[in-house]
Image: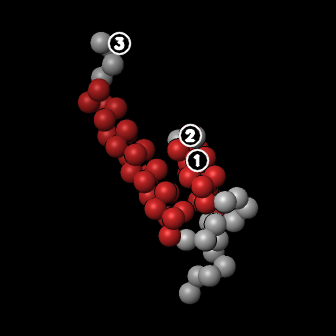
Amino acid sequence: MSDINWAAWVPVIIILIAFVVFCIVDIARNDVKYLPKWLWILISLVSIPLGGIIYLLLGRDHSKSS
């Protein structure tokens, strides 16, 4: 465990946390497709980063774009 270079992992962890926060805020503010909002949030939290990527590709509702 002491062989882990935390200085290299901290930026990756920060980026992942920021990505999850972005997805949750986007889900809360916009309409979604296929699943309820609470389930998209759960998927995004449980499966980082794949859940967020799936939401961005499939779950966003772009029908109300201006």
SS class, disc 2: helix
Question: In the rendered view of the protein, which quadrant contains the C terminus?
Answer: bottom right
Q: Is residue 53 left or right of residue 15?
A: right
**Mark 3 vs 1, N-terminal side:** 3
Label 1 and label 2: CA atoms lie apart by 6 Å
Name the image quarter holding residue 65: bottom right
Residue drawn at (54%, 63%), measured in percent from left and top?
27
SS class, disc 1: helix
Label 3 and label 2: CA atoms lie apart by 24 Å
Q: Residue furthest bottom?
A: 66
Name the image quarter holding residue 61: bottom right
Residue drawn at (49%, 57%), measured in percent from left and top?
24
Q: Is residue 58 visible?
A: no
Question: In the rendered view of the protein, which quadrant contains the N terminus?
Answer: top left
- Name the residue nearer the viewer: 24 or 62: 24
**43 above or below 30?**
above
Label 3 belongs to which residue? 1
Label 2 belongs to which residue? 46
Residue 57: x percent and y percent? 64, 59
Residue drawn at (66%, 60%), measured in percent from left and top?
36
Callout 1, which amino acid? Leu
Residue 49: x percent and y percent? 53, 44
Residue 28: x percent and y percent? 51, 64
Query: Label 3 neighbourhood size at 10 Å, few (<14), some (14-19), many (20+)?
Result: few
Query: Label 2 neighbourhood size at 10 Å, few (<14), some (14-19), many (20+)?
Result: few
